[in-house]
C-alpha cells in the first residue's frame, strides 16, 4: 500500500504533466487541496472555475471566492440555469448526470476561452463506491481527475490538507443540496436555499456534520453519532427544533444511523 507521501509525489507529478490546468473549484475539502497543489506546481498556469447554482451552499461560494483572493488565483464564476433542465428540476435518479453535463459543459466553455484545455475535478477513489451518475458526464467531457490518478481516498485528502496547513482539512462535506430530497421531488431555488440556511444554522450550534433530509413534512436529521450526546442537551435540541419548525416542517426525527453520504440512494440500490 502506498504511503501518503508517495501518493502526494504522484499527485504533484500528475498535475505537472498537464502544464496548464483549470480546476473545478467549489471551496470544499477536495477541490481546495487540488487547487492549492496545482497552484504550487503550475503557478499562474492555473485558474479556478466555480459553478454558482441553487444546489450549491451560499457559504461555499463565499469561502471559495475568499480563498482565490487570498491566493491570488484567477476565478471564473459559471451560472448555468440547471433548474431549466427537466431531469434536474424533477430530481430524476439520473439528475446528477444532466446537472454535471450542464455544469462542466459551461465550465469547459469558459476555460477554453481562457486558453485552458484541461479541466480537473476533485473526484477521489471513495467516490467510485457510491451511485454517482454524474461520473459519466465527467468522463464524456474528458474532465481529468488527478486524485483518482494518484489513488487518493477522502482520508488521504484530509490528511494531506492537514499536513499542508489548509483550514479545510476538517471541514464538513457539503454535497449537492439536491441530495437532501428523495428522487422525484420537484426542486426549486427557494426550497434548496431553505435547506442550506437550516443546515448552516444547525452547524453553527457546534455540530460537525449536518444533513437535513426532507421527506414531505418530515425531516430526517443526520448528525455524526459522536454528536448525539450534544443533541440531547435540552437547550440545543430545542434550538434545532425551532430552526426546522420555522422552515415549515411538522415533524423532526434523528436518524439513528448517523451521518452518511448518499443515504438517499438507498431507495434506488441497483438502479442503473
Image: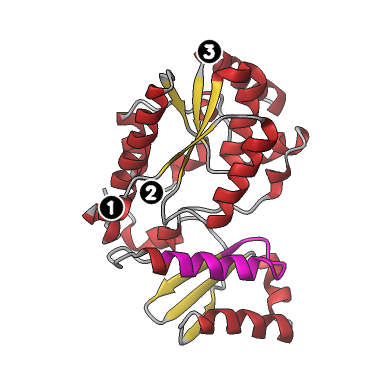
Q: Could you tell me which secondary element the residue under label 2 belongs to? A: loop
Q: Name the residue under label 2.
A: 131
Residue 109 visible:
yes
The reply to whether dot 3 and dot 2 touch (C-beta < 8 Å) is no
* Residue 15 horizontal side relative to residue 70, left or right: left
The answer for how far apart the CA atoms under marks 1 and 2 are is: 8 Å
User: Can you name the residue that lies furthest to the left here?
Assistant: 86
Q: Give the numbered dot on residue 140.
A: none
Q: In this view, does 157 lie above or below 236?
A: above
The reply to whether dot 3 and dot 1 touch (C-beta < 8 Å) is no
Q: Which secondary structure class fits the magenta region best? A: helix
Q: Could you tell me which secondary element the residue under label 1 belongs to? A: loop
Q: What stretch is highlighted in magenta?
A: 192-210
The answer for how far apart the CA atoms under marks 3 and 1 are is: 39 Å
Q: Mark 1 points at which residue?
A: 271
Sequence-earlier tag: 1 or 2: 2
Residue 257 visible:
no
Amino acid at each position: 500500500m502506498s504511503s501518503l507521501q508517495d501518493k502526494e509525489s504522484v499527485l504533484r507529478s500528475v498535475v505537472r504533466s498537464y502544464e496548464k490546468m483549470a480546476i473545478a473549484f467549489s471551496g470544499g475539502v477536495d477541490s481546495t487541496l487540488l487547487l492549492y497543489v496545482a497552484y504550487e506546481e503550475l503557478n499562474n498556469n492555473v485558474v479556478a472555475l466555480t459553478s454558482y447554482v441553487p444546489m450549491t451552499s451560499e457559504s461555499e461560494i463565499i469561502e471559495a471566492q475568499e480563498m482565490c483572493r487570498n491566493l491570488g488565483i484567477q476565478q471564473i464564476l459559471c451560472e448555468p440555469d440547471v433548474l431549466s433542465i427537466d431531469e434536474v428540476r424533477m430530481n430524476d435518479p439520473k439528475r446528477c448526470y444532466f446537472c454535471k453535463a450542464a455544469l462542466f459543459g459551461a465550465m469547459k466553455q469558459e476555460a477554453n476561452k481562457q486558453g485552458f484545455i484541461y479541466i480537473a475535478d476533485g473526484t477521489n477513489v471513495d467516490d467510485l463506491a457510491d451511485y454517482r451518475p454524474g461520473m459519466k458526464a465527467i468522463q464524456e467531457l474528458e474532465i481529468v481527475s488527478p486524485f483518482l490518478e494518484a489513488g487518493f481516498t477522502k482520508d488521504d485528502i484530509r490528511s494531506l490538507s492537514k499536513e499542508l496547513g489548509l483550514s479545510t482539512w476538517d471541514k464538513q462535506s457539503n454535497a449537492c443540496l439536491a441530495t437532501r430530497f428523495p428522487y422525484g421531488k420537484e426542486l426549486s431555488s427557494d426550497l434548496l436555499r431553505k435547506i442550506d440556511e437550516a443546515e448552516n444554522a444547525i452547524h453553527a450550534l457546534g455540530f460537525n456534520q449536518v444533513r437535513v433530509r426532507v421527506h414531505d413534512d418530515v425531516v430526517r436529521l443526520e448528525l455524526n453519532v459522536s454528536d448525539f450526546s450534544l443533541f440531547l442537551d435540552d437547550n440545543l435540541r430545542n434550538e434545532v427544533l425551532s430552526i426546522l419548525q420555522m422552515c415549515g416542517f411538522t415533524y423532526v426525527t434523528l436518524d439513528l444511523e448517523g451521518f452518511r453520504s448518499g443515504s438517499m440512494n438507498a431507495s434506488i440500490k441497483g438502479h442503473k
